[in-house]
Amino acid sequence: MKFIKSKSEKIFYVVNLCIILLFTFMCLYPIWYVIIGSVSSGVRAHTAFLWPKGFSLTTYKTFFSRSDIGLAFLISILKTAVGTVLSVFFTSMLAYLVTQQKMLFRKFVYRYFIVTMYVSGGMIPWYITMKSYGLYNNFFVYVIPGILSVFNMILVKTFVESLPASLEESAKLDGAGFVTIFVKIILPLSKPIIATISVYTAVGQWNSWIDNYILVHTKSLKTLQLLLYEYLNKATSLASQMKNIANTAGVANAEAAFKVTPDSVRMTMIVITIIPIMLVYPFAQKYFTKGIMIGAVKG
Amino acid sequence: MKKKFLRMVAILLTMSLISGCGSNPTNDDSSSAAVADTAKPSSDAASDTSDKTTATGAAQLKLEPIADTTPCTITIGGLNDVTTSGIENTGIGKKILELTGITVELVDVDGTKLTTLAASGDLPDILYVGDTTGLLTKSLIESGNLIPLNDLLETRGQNTIARAETAINHLKAQTDGIAYVIPTGITSLAMDDPQYNGGNGFYTRFDLYSGIGAPEINGMDSFLNTLQQVQQAYPTSPDGKKAYALSAWTDWGIWPYYNILPGLMGYESLVVNQYVNRYTGEWTSSFLDPQSVFWQGIEFYFKANQLGILDPDALTQGWSQLGTKIANGEVYTCCAGNWSVPDKAVCGDEAGLFLLPGSFPVIPGVYTEESELGWGFYNSHAITSACENPERAMDLLNFFDSPEGARLLFNGIMGVDWDYIDGVPQPIGEYLDCLLGLGSTTYISDNGMGCLQYMSAATAWTCPDGYSANLTTSTAYYNLVMQQDKAAQKFVAENNNGDASISYPGKVYAMLGTEGVMHNMTHFAWPSFAGLITVSTEFSKAEANAETYIEGKLGELILAKDQEAFNAAQNKVIEELKAQGLETAEEELVEKLQAAKEQLQSQVVGNTAPLDNGFDISGMNKAP
Amino acid sequence: MKTAARFRVSSGMKYLLIALPFMIFTFMFSYVPLFGWLIAFTDYTIGTRITALQFTGFSAFTDILKQKNEVLRVTTNSLAMSGLGLLSSPLAALFAIMLNEIKSKKLRQFIQTATTFPNFISWIVVYGFAFSIFSNNGLLNTLLGQLGLPQSSTGLLGDTRYVWVFQLFLQIWKGLGWGAIIYLAAIAGIDQELYEAAEIDGANKFARIRYITIPSLMPTYFVLLILAITNILNNGFDQYFVFYNPMVANKIEVLDYFIYKLAFIMNEMPMSIAVGMIKSFISIALIFLANQASKKIRGTSIF
């Protein structure tokens, strides 16, 4: 039905496509650079632009042959899943809650949350506080503090406010309670925004390592990101240890340094982190495509 | 949604299980034939407790459990664990457990984590403190994070006292007679075994220098001209990229500008950014005195830029990027012989970095120098108040300071990694192969040799069996390394005048010293001040301020158009620093230095000997 | 009547009560740790234990005044970078709109995924990549050399003239695809029938975008814009840390980098926290200002 396009629309379409493809190339090439860098031999990783130089899977092999890798993957997945579900649920509930005009002191309550985005005491009180709550050396450290994300809350609130008011009103007149309306009406209609904050939260959970590094020392609770960070540390300190093994064996350790440099480890880290994300991402992506919201208001 | 999620979990788990659950060290190099004679392990190593003798007639080391072996776990923080799977899983960790009953765990503690843990009193049991000013140590002590060690040393630390008594006493004196830290870096002089390739300096591609006929060099300016000749003869790397003789890097602050030249000019680090002249014992302000060795360092790079031999990326690249350039033959000098090396596959077998004879007055780091005080507060270790078993922690440190423990830390397990061959202890087996670049490249990092070496107070001393605690510092071992190092062979062949006893680069440097071409250091002109001078917070803050200020001005200085512009920029910096109050802050150093000198002369025995050769360096720095 | 009045009050109270557990949670995790601000009034130095601190009053704040020039310099840099960022804020929305116009769903999804990749590349690797392109022996110079064109000797990484623009470019590159997600979600929430109705009424593509898509994105865009304004002093740290070098030092040090420098390089933690406190208060003040402006311009308040 749309095969009659005006000339200006056609030009627009072509120009649009070109610009977008150009930008896409600019996004894809660097990741290609990272991928081939991670399978190039250490020092040459920087000069490989089209194809790996000195193809070598050393970094991957070394990393994946750790005995704790399986457990770390599991912990990371668990942390991401549980943390995301909890955070998305409660954050969006809070977002819906503050849209209720009738709430007593609503403005104060809302601002109470907003202010927390701009204040922070720093690492030291964070550590002391978490320890005093017992959030130390256990799994809850990973998922409890992140339950409320004010930024995501603002996004959801904005979205919910654009939903037709009649839906809510009719449900209330029918006697539905707050939680019921939230679960049965608001959530299903907010799929795009829920998908968005789920992606933001899940990626944040997957990438975080500071909570593990500072607050959890139990070996069985190590996350993948911490393992990656430790791996990078070793590569960096291996390079400096070379310096300390008293100017001897310049031959041996130099060779080792060629194979695995901190930068090639960093590139490996990026690839290892991205692949699981990209495997799961398409499931959320379909909620961004248009056409989901079909005339729910009618009738 | 749920089904897909579970499927994803299943896929990922399978992936990780397939990729292997063992902690096998990776070994993807084909093992070439190991060096034959030294690969045979002694047949009756570990279980033999009879008294055997070494080639020098001394008793061989015996590994025996210590007195108290109550099981316990001790955490050590501040070292970087360079093992792949955790020290407790390596042979060394298991041996320590067997002999002491202690399971050692290494805890990663970087800057932020250290301050956080210190603030809440949750530090690991043993803390390794790297602290150039002494202030970190001071605040750890004052806030009760470190425990007094006097009694523990007395009752359970006899080995430590034997290694480090002088140093401990000196540090004690700064903290009201109570010992809180045990220093490391205590060394005794080893004249027979110079180090393989010297300390920090401007190491140059000897193969290229040789390629232009190895012209005579007569001091700093002459060296710069020679570098220019090298660059003109070899303007591009093997890959066709533009090559430069000299370069620098930015992510270590002003390190390249004040840590390379001073050693070459006969200076020794004092505190923070300050240097003392080893010949005269005099100090002058690094930043405020335009003639200081620091400013000479900056001017060195300025002159290099004037000659067109300074890499344009010197002020924008990180250490990684510089390493890549050196490996690919785009830069011809480095600050050490083996911190970043040319890739032989790209630059040829004979590509190597060495100090060029005559380039500077002094060759630093040739001999392991006599140092009774070690590194003072810097690199010391302590037992923290969070430790629940301080006696066992002391047992552990004491063990590390025993000859057997130290050898274990440096060189691994007797009978597996090193052993007595014909009465001479030397590295063997896979450890030796790894050191020589044959066999596995990850053996050392998988097994942790050297990873705990700073838990031992002394890093270079002679064990009761008559040999160095660290077996990778002997002439015999270096000769083995030489067999693999064609670049070093070339350097030695062209510099030793046919004398076969000068068999590795370090010995060439030693010869240059005895012949008077360049100077070698054997004693600190004044014993290391590091243990004696603690500066105030104001001083170190002022210095930190000055340092970051100068860092921002490096472009104006090094890339100045001509000498006039350089002098003007230099004056401006000095004026500005004075306006910021640096001069007043440094006044305390004058007093403290004087006091330290007086204290040293009355307390330390045997270190006020005049310098060897009585060498006159005043004529060294003349232009050709 | 009476029943209606009671209904209103009790439901207002009801919502407040539901909000209470959330508020307690936030109190525990966001407000309690603020006791760390007290450190700004003590003699804390690296390695000290909290229990051993002594109060020193406002000395950290007066020290900040002594470093006035420094503070002004880094704040200017922060404002410049944030300002440029604000100017480029419509780009994410524009990108989402443009992406939406691509017919093929598969291509759209592929592009959308591909453009999020830069978000996952850590800044230090971005630096390594930028270096390999823009350095003296990098890709750019090599290509220019092969084409016979003059090569740059300073290189982009050390050029003070282009620091802000270059960093802005990197930020856009890294964040565009990821930031467009929220706008795509907003577009996905627009009722399709609006478009169909408009098309029937004769509106062409541009008109449809102008009168349907853009107004639907406005609430989201506006909220994010306000948030960006209130965050004008928060630039993050990683990017500026890795691209720091002596040549561009003057322009690249932003406030967050300065705060880090104070705490960990200069050992001035109380001062660092004091600056952080001031930054927080300014940001909160900006919230109220932005709110007032929003009321005037759009008639509704954001907060």
Image: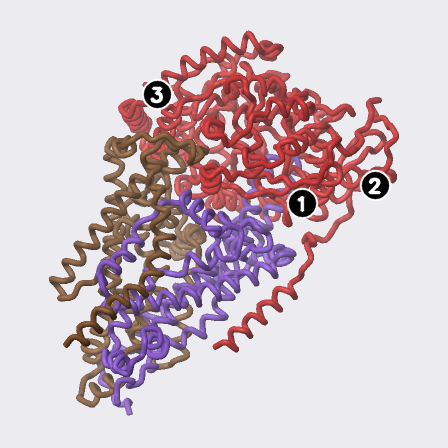
Chain colours: A purple, B red, C brown
Residue type indicated by callout 2? Lys
Do the residues marked 2 and 3 share a common chain? yes
Residue A229 vertical position relative to residue B392 in the rendered view, above or below: below
- Classify mark 2: residues with Cα within 10 Å, few (<14), some (14-19) or many (20+): some
Q: How many marks?
A: 3
Q: Does the residue at mark 3 contact the one at mark 1 (Cβ under 8 Å)? A: no
Q: Between disc 2 and disc 3, whose residue precedes?
A: 2
**Other residues around mark 3 within 10 Å, as few (<14) / some (14–19) / many (≥20):** some
Q: Is residue B525 left or right of residue A122?
A: right
Can residue B278 be seen in this snapshot? yes
Q: Mark 2 or mark 3, which is nearer to you?
A: 3
Secondary structure of the residue carrying numbered label 1:
helix
Looking at the image, which residue sits at the far bottom?
Answer: A1
Residue extending furthest left? C296
Residue B505 relative to residue B109: left or right: right
Question: Which type of secondary structure does the marked residue at label 2 adopt?
Answer: loop
Rendering coords of residue B315 (x, y %): 39, 39
In this view, the residue farthest toward the front is C2
Quarter where residue A197 is shown: bottom left
Labelled disc at residue B88:
1
Residue B130 placed where, x, y %?
A: 52, 32
Say which chain tag 2 marks. Answer: B
Q: Gap between marks 2 and 1, in whole Å? A: 27 Å
The residue wearing badge 2 is B40
Amino acid type at mark 3: Ala
Question: In front here: C36 or B271?
Answer: C36
Question: Is residue A168 placed above or below C253 in the rendered structure?
Answer: below
Question: How many other residues sit within 10 Å of disc 1, few (<14), some (14-19) or many (≥20)?
Answer: many
Q: Nearer the viewer, mark 2 or mark 1?
A: 1
> Residue B600: x percent and y percent?
54, 11
- Write the residue at 63% across / 35% down: B389
The residue pinned by badge 3 equals B585
